[in-house]
Image (spheres, grey):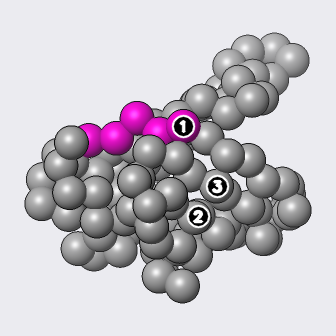
Amino acid sequence: MSNLTYAGKTYKFSIDNGVVFHNIYSPDGTTLHYKTVAGPNTGASEDVTLHAAEVAPGVFLLGWVEKSGMTVTHAMNLNTLTVHLFWTYDTPDSRIGELHVGTLKEM
């Protein structure tokens, strides 16, 4: 595995839709504990297992599946402290996919 420079760090992650998370990465970079600190699901938190790859120096592709069935993929650029993300989730009528962009600030 490559040098996961986000491992062991905590970031405030602010998304373009107003949702804000605190993302806490395990020391080995294989798990994430996130907590929603602003937005519709404030207070929600979960520990997830990460699938991670460094795709360019300082740029990581991270993916996981949440207990709810939501899938999340981040293209996390630690050089610019930006994230492009894609998530999917079920609604009563269909499965929805959304693209968003966000910023990181190390805590």
Dot 2: element: strand
Q: Which of disc 2 and disc 3 is earlier in sequence? A: 2
To which quarter of the image does residue 8 belong? Answer: bottom left
State which quarter of the image contains the C terminus: bottom right
> What segment is highlighted magenta in the picture?
49-53
Farthest top residue? 93
* Front residue of 82 and 95: 82
Dot 1: element: strand
Residue 94, horizontal then vertical, whole percent: 73, 15
Q: CA distance from mark 3 to mark 1?
A: 9 Å
To which quarter of the image does residue 80 belong? Answer: bottom left
Above or below: residue 58 compared with residue 92: below
Residue 52 belongs to magenta span: yes
Q: Main secondary structure of the magenta part?
A: strand
Residue 83 seen anywhere in this rendered image of the structure? no
Above or below: residue 57 compared with residue 49: below
Q: CA distance from mark 3 to mark 2?
A: 6 Å
Q: Residue under label 1, please give it.
A: 49
User: Which residue appears at 39% of the width and 62% of the height?
Assistant: 7
* Front residue of 28 and 66: 28
**Is residue 80 rendered to the left or right of residue 65?**
left
Residue 74 seen anywhere in this rendered image of the structure? yes
User: Are discs 3 and 2 less than 8 Å apart at CB?
Assistant: yes
Q: Residue under label 2, please give it.
A: 23
